[in-house]
Image (tube, rainbow, N blue to C red):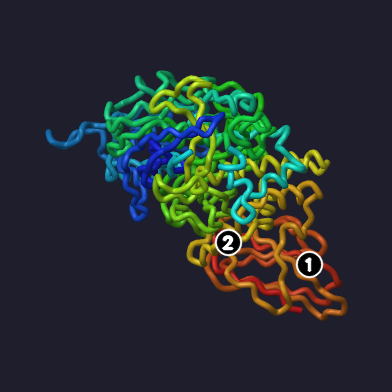
């Protein structure tokens, strides 16, 4: 699994996977001068998802009762034994691949251990090694240390009025100006877990200290065909600046791609919190919030183990050898991902679970392969807010991943070539450098890009607006689950319907509506869909761990109220309560059976509003919900 940015940009690694590159154009931050720069030509193959064919690095987690849980020596013995049993430590013949040795690297924040092989293992060798590791009853899970990439699409041509349709367009934009009447994100920190950041006149004032989590750098390589991922000559440190992620074609992970630097993290950060009302450049969605840059992606992407530790640290967790985060974030933005379901990426899920458990909302990009996002991680990880992309036409962008795991959509752009107009792109901050960045302010530019990488920070910015509004109004911080439910319930409709086979969430995120609800105090009705007596509501579905909410108004003198779910696929549970939204631990009645067929009957129910929770225990789709009285 490779991890990529969720956006298309000139000279971006992810474009090799998620989209074709076109001409990239930059705009001077203070004027409207254009300078064309040609990006590399890379073909887009939505039918060929990125599949990592060899692995140097592996993640193993041991059960609490195992000695290897806390002993690097025991881990080394365990992985060495697994390699021997897999036949990797001896050379079968003079023509066979070199014997493999394993080296212990470090313990991750989520309790897993990272080990590295002396050479890349091919798919057969990888399978054999993992099989032997998993055969050990002390092992909780073992997986490759997948590479993940930016989820991008590209830059194009030539400030708030002329470029930021994504914030202002009545139909396709998110309605930011109306939300700003109430909230600008003050007091919130949003972590951008990405390529790092650049000093930029339209961003620097809103940066708080971050961290560089990239552990793979030049002298740390075991095989010289693999890239210097970090590109800054060192490993983990407190400098999260982006030195550039250009490719010269020699990087083994990247299939011979030649590309200029993307400065992807700066583009994402600008969408969230570019400095506003400074007569310069663009407006950030949550422009009084702060951005914490967490560098996890470099040349050819980044390792899951580094990304997971970045998630843990950014959300206020502890990472060995890294100073405590003095300003932990309330929102995390991950415009990155890779092919392979989250169920095969438990280390990533561990880190996300930790963040959500600390009350932090995790926003991720759906990916740009025009495929079901259920096949990508972290897009399919339970608990996250997965964001698909729409264009200025208000419909699903041609590249955007889709499916039941997608929570909502947001503007990501829909450009097809370098000749598309400015409203085909999402405009944010960049740099004129092709490899290393040109120092600010000389190198400061605006850059047009498209992709779900660009869609996700729209939602992360809106979450910051919601949280700031809720706290300012005296309602306290919203839980991640409540944030997700409100975003889903308060959406703008798609202008061009994405169709039943390609859903990208419940609609386009509506900043004004969710901020208004957060300010007023979120009531049960803000999260629920109405059920009409004896009229089935078909086609319902949710990602694993998510819930769907409904309400039914029951009049006086009713003999019974029946609630049912049936049909479709997956496994759901049914909860009901009068006067409040039930949880899985607080409810009036519940039906918890395997599958999607659930039924509840309440005799002589009192008049009032009954709230229904349909909990998806696994990913579920096509379910019908019915209320009858």
2 or 1: tag closer to the N-terminus: 2
Pair 2/1: label in front: 2
User: In the figure, 413 relative to 526: above or below?
Assistant: above
Circle 2 sits on which residue? 495
User: In the figure, 575 relative to 108: above or below?
Assistant: below
Which label belongs to residue 610? Answer: 1
Residue 43 in percent (x, y) is at: 32, 47
Left or right: where 515 falls relative to 559:
left
User: In the figure, 471 relative to 202: above or below?
Assistant: below
Left or right: where 159 falls relative to 436:
right
- Number of residues whose C-alpha sits closer than 10 Å to that of mark 1, classed few (under 14), some (14–19) or many (20 or more): many
The CA distance from mark 2 to mark 1 is: 32 Å
Which label belongs to residue 199? Answer: none
Q: Is residue 69 visible?
A: no
Where's the N terminus, which quadrant?
A: top left
Toward which corner of the image does residue 3 lie, by quadrant?
top left
């Amino acid at each position: 699994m490779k991890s990529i940015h969720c956006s298309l940009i000139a000279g971006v690694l992810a474009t090799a996977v998620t989209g074709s590159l076109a001409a990239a154009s930059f705009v001077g931050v203070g004027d409207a001068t254009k300078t064309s720069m040609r990006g590399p030509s890379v073909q887009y193959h939505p039918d060929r998802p990125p599949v990592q064919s060899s692995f140097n690095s592996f993640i193993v987690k041991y059960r609490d009762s195992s000695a290897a849980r806390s002993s690097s020596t025991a881990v080394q013995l365990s992985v060495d034994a697994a390699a021997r049993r897999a036949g990797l430590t001896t050379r079968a013949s003079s023509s066979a691949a070199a014997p493999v040795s394993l080296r212990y690297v470090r313990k991750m924040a989520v309790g897993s251990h990272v080990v590295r092989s002396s050479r890349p293992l091919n798919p057969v060798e990888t399978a054999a090694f993992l099989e032997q590791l998993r055969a050990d009853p002390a092992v909780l899970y073992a997986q490759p240390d997948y590479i993940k990439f930016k989820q991008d699409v590209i830059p194009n041509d030539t400030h708030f009025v002329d470029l930021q349709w994504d914030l202002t367009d009545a139909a396709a934009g998110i309605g930011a100006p109306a939300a700003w009447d109430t909230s600008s994100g003050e007091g919130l920190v949003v972590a951008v877990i990405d390529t790092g950041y650049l000093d930029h006149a339209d961003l620097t004032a809103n940066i708080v200290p971050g961290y560089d989590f990239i552990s793979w750098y030049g002298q740390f390589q075991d095989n010289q065909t693999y890239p210097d991922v970090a590109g800054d000559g060192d490993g983990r440190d407190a400098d999260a600046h982006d030195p550039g992620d250009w490719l010269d074609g020699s990087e083994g992970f990247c299939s011979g791609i030649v590309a200029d630097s993307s400065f992807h993290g700066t583009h994402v950060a600008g969408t969230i919190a570019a400095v506003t009302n400074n007569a310069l450049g663009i407006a950030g969605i949550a422009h009084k919030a702060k951005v914490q840059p967490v560098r996890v992606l470099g040349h050819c992407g980044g390792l899951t183990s580094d990304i997971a530790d970045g998630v843990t640290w950014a959300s206020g967790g502890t990472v060995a050898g890294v100073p405590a985060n003095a300003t932990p974030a309330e929102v995390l933005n991950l415009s990155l991902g890779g092919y392979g379901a989250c169920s095969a990426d438990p280390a990533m899920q561990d880190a996300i679970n930790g963040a959500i458990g600390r009350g932090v909302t995790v926003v991720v990009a759906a990916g740009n392969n025009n495929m079901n996002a259920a096949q990508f991680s972290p897009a399919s990880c339970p608990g996250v807010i997965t964001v698909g992309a729409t264009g200025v036409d208000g419909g699903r962008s041609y590249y955007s991943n889709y499916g039941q795991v997608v929570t909502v959509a947001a503007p990501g752009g829909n450009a097809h070539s370098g000749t598309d107009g400015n409203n085909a792109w999402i405009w944010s901050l960049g740099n004129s450098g092709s490899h290393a960045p040109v120092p600010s302010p000389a190198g400061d530019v605006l850059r047009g890009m498209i992709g779900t990488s660009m869609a996700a920070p729209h939602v992360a910015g809106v979450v910051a607006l919601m949280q700031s509004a809720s706290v300012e109004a005296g309602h306290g911080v919203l839980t991640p689950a409540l944030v997700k439910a409100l975003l889903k319930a308060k959406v703008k409709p798609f202008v061009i319907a994405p169709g039943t086979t390609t859903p990208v969430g419940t609609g386009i995120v509506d900043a004004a509506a969710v901020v208004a609800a957060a300010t007023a105090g979120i009531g049960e009705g803000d999260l629920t869909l109405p059920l009409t007596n004896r009229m089935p509501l078909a086609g319902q579905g949710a990602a694993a761990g998510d819930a769907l909410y409904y309400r039914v108004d029951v009049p006086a003198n009713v003999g019974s109220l029946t609630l049912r779910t049936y049909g479709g696929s997956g496994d759901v549970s049914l909860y009901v309560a009068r006067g409040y939204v039930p949880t899985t631990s607080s409810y009036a009645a519940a039906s918890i059976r395997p599958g999607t067929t659930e039924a509840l009957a309440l005799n002589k129910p009192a008049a009032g509003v009954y709230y229904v929770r349909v909990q998806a225990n696994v990913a579920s789709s096509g379910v019908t919900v019915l209320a009858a009285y």
